[in-house]
């Protein structure tokens, strides 16, 4: 074993109470960092998962009609923008656009849809709904309804539809029942419910009627058309970049989930900054703690360090002895702290339950978190040891032996 | 030059505002294989001089040669390396590192110099500890040893890397007469058997009397240098 390691490990073993003290400081610090990260990362992951459970990553639609002023700028004019509220427009030549966007780097799936507002009527009950006309195979690749089915099958073909569990409750229908769906301009259709789903979002569960593309085209008078193309991308947080890319290539307008949920992302970001701030102060406190204990130990060992220097130990070796002490304690503290932090997190997850007993959200304990904690704690240990180690290395051996 | 040590007109002052001149032009030389004592009243500058020779401190003026090498030319790192190779130390108090066993203490100078341990180092340390009669105490910690035993370990440590010159600052000062005798005899034996050069600071006139040569320091100057006076 190299000399520095031999001496450092021996000192750590011999200075039991000091070692225990810094180990405790590191462990507690790391456990706070791990616990906080597991909690916040878990919360955020579950928020994002919930958001993305019923939303495509990117939605492409035809550009809004832009009103061009007829007058030169500077002259005053009243411009009345008239947008027919119900008139839906199709993406021109959407099937070639579909092929085009499928090739955009990062896009993993693309699905054409006809989406519009309507009413679902059964008996005397009448509820506002959103009809999503889709190609089942393509749609499933963008939003995974299949695995969220509560009853029936995901087979929106012909006049069969799949509806949200909330809507099924509101209208009191089950698989096999029929509904009437009425769009504007008195177009309507009788459809059969073949499945219900729970996408984890009340708004969606209460309103979505997933129908076949053809059915929706008829309902909204868009023969052969598609009002949007919805995309799934490999990395959710690349969505905005890919949306811009896709918009540029197709000339369509593209909205990413990140843009639509800007509020949520701002919230997550500020939650992250407060997490980082807390962790930053924990790191500072732990660093100071380690540094002060190590300084005391250097002062206590002055004479020994003097003797080591006198028998031919170089300054750099003495320096490394104390750096190693700091790093080793940091590393071990990160193991203990990770275990503690994981235990806290799991205990918290067991205590924090919804009224019905299901966990509110899963804490996120993963390898990158533990690896990060080890790297962080080892660096803290090293950093904290710099001043004590330099002090030890600079010690004047003659003085240290005389007074130490 | 056959001199192991040459000290030439060495002056050492301490303090900035109030300067105390502790050594005022000390000069003497030791040939290879000499067994000398450095004596003098308390405060006469013996430890100060030994620290300078031991390369733990630098003189204010004057020169020191060790093994023909002008040590004022060495930088900090070279001094440390040179010290490790050439010199062996025996201190009066707190000589050993309490966290390490007797064997490890003896190995430390070579271990520190080379960076990693070798079986030769271990064998040599064990051999030296048997030579000082501690073959049964290899794994003992310093606090499990008597003062005399500790000092014998310190001597073994000073000799571990075959230094040209062993410097001992009152090695027997802290021991009862019997242990002091033992420790002194041990140094004499190593001198006899291995021809190592010794410079021993002592207060004890009986010890000085049993050396081959005595250098006496009073008020930072050499007042006598010759065969020990009875
Ligand atoms: N680092 C220092 N700073 C200031 N004064 C010092 C220093 N080292 C030694 N002195 C002074 O130098 C003088 C000589 O000290 P030194 O330790 O060399 O004496 P000594 O001969 O070894 O004495 P003793 O026999 O008591 O050990 C003393 O007056 C001491 O106070
Ligand atoms: Mg002294």
Image (cartoon, grey):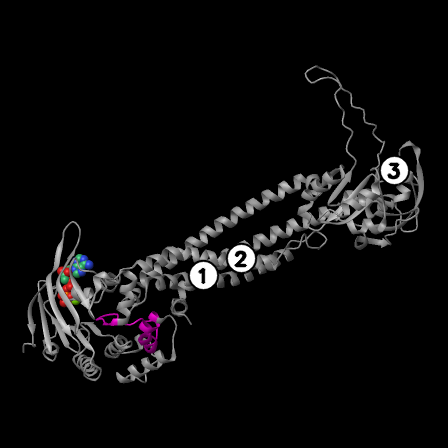
Label 1: few (<14), some or many (≥20) within 10 Å?
many
Residues at discs 3 and 1 both on one chain: yes
For residue B106, which quarter of the picture? bottom left
- A158 or B49: nearer the viewer: B49
Circle 3: is it few (<14), some (14-19), or many (20+) Cα within 10 Å? some
Query: A269 or B10: which is nearer to us?
Result: B10
Residue A149 x, y percent position in the rendering = 82, 53
Q: Which residues are magenta?
A: B86-113
Residue drawn at the location 46% of the way across and 56% of the way down: A380
User: Which mark is nearer the camera, 3 or 1?
Assistant: 1
**How far apart are the alpha carbons under marks 3 and 1?**
66 Å
Q: Secondary structure at mark 3?
A: strand
Disc 2 with disc 3 on a shared chain: yes
Contact between labelled residues 2 and 1, with CB atoms less than 8 Å apart: no
Quadrant holding the C terminus of chain A: bottom left
Classify residue A134 as left or right of residue B127: right
Question: Of marks 3 and 1, which one's residue comes earlier in the chain?
Answer: 3
Work out whether mark 1 precedes mark 2 in sequence or the reverse, and give the earlier one. 1
Q: Position of residue A247 (x, y in %)?
A: 73, 39
Ligand 2 found in image quarter: bottom left
Q: Which residue is mark 1?
A: A327
Task: Indicate which disc residue A119 carries.
Answer: 3
Q: Label 2: chain?
A: A
Give the CA separation, mark 2 to mark 3.
53 Å
- Where residue A141 appears, x then y in whole percent? 79, 51
- Taking depth in this image into account, of A143 and A108 the one nearest to the observer is A108
Task: Give the label on residue A100, or none.
Answer: none
Q: How many marks?
A: 3
Residue of label 2: A373
**Marked residue chain, label 1:** A
Contact (Cβ within 8 Å) of mark 2 with mark 3: no
The residue most toward the top is A75
């Amino acid at each position: 074993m190299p000399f520095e390691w031999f001496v450092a490990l021996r000192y750590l073993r011999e200075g039991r109470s000091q070692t225990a003290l810094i180990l405790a400081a590191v462990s507690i610090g790391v456990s706070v960092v791990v616990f906080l990260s597991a909690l916040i990362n878990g919360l955020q992951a579950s928020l994002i998962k919930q958001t993305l459970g019923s939303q495509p990553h990117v939605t492409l639609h035809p550009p809004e009609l832009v009103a061009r002023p007829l007058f030169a700028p500077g002259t005053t004019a009243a411009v009345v923008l008239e947008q027919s509220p119900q008139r839906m427009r199709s993406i021109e030549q959407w099937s070639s656009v579909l092929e085009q966007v499928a090739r955009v780097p990062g896009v993993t799936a693309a699905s054409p849809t006809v989406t519009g507002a309507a009413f679902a009527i059964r008996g005397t009950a009448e509820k506002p709904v959103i009809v999503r006309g889709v190609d089942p195979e393509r749609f499933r690749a963008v939003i995974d309804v299949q695995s969220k089915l509560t009853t029936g099958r995901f087979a929106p073909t012909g006049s069969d539809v799949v509806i949200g569990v909330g809507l099924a409750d509101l209208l009191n229908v089950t698989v096999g029942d029929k509904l009437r769906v009425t769009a504007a301009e008195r177009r309507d259709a009788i459809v059969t419910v073949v499945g219900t789903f729970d996408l984890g979002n009340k708004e969606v569960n209460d309103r979505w009627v997933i129908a076949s593309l053809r059915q929706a085209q008829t309902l909204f008078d868009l023969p052969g058309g598609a009002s949007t193309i919805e995309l799934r991308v490999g990395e959710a947080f690349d969505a905005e970049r890919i949306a811009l890319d896709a918009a540029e290539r197709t000339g369509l307008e593209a909205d990413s989930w990140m843009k639509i949920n800007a509020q949520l992302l701002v919230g997550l970001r500020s939650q992250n900054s407060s997490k980082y701030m807390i962790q930053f102060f924990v790191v500072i406190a732990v660093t100071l703690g380690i540094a002060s204990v190590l300084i005391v130990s250097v002062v206590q060992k002055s004479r020994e360090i003097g003797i080591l220097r006198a028998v031919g130990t170089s300054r750099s070796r003495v320096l490394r002895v104390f750096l190693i002490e700091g790093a080793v304690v940091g590393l071990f503290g990160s193991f203990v702290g990770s275990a503690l932090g994981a235990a806290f997190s799991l205990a918290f997850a067991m205590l924090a339950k919804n009224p019905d007993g299901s966990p509110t959200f899963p804490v996120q304990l993963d390898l990158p978190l533990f690896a990060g904690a080890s790297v962080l704690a080892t660096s803290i240990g090293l950093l904290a040891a710099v001043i004590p180690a330099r002090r030890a290395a600079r010690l004047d051996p003659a003085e240290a032996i005389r007074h130490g | 030059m056959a001199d192991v040590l040459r000290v030439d007109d060495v002056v050492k002052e301490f303090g900035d505002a109030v300067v105390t001149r502790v050594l005022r032009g000390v000069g003497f030389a030791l040939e290879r294989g000499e067994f000398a004592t450095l004596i003098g009243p308390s405060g006469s500058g013996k430890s100060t001089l030994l620290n300078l020779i031991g390369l733990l401190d630098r003189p204010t003026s004057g020169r020191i040669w060790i093994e023909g090498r002008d040590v004022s030319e060495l930088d900090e790192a070279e001094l440390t390396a040179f010290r490790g190779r050439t010199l062996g130390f025996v201190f009066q108090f707190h000589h050993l590192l309490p966290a390490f066993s007797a064997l490890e203490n003896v190995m430390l100078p070579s271990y520190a110099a080379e960076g990693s341990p070798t079986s030769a180092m271990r064998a040599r340390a064990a051999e030296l500890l048997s030579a000082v009669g501690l073959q049964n105490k290899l794994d003992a910690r310093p606090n499990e040893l008597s003062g005399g035993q500790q000092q014998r370990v310190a001597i073994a440590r000073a000799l571990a890397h075959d230094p040209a010159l062993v410097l001992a600052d009152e090695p027997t000062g802290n021991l009862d007469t019997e242990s002091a005798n033992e420790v002194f005899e041990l140094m004499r034996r190593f001198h006899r058997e291995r021809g190592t050069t010794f410079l021993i600071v002592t207060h004890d006139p009986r010890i000085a009397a049993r050396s081959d040569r005595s250098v006496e320091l009073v008020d930072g100057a050499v007042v006598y240098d010759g065969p020990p006076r009875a």
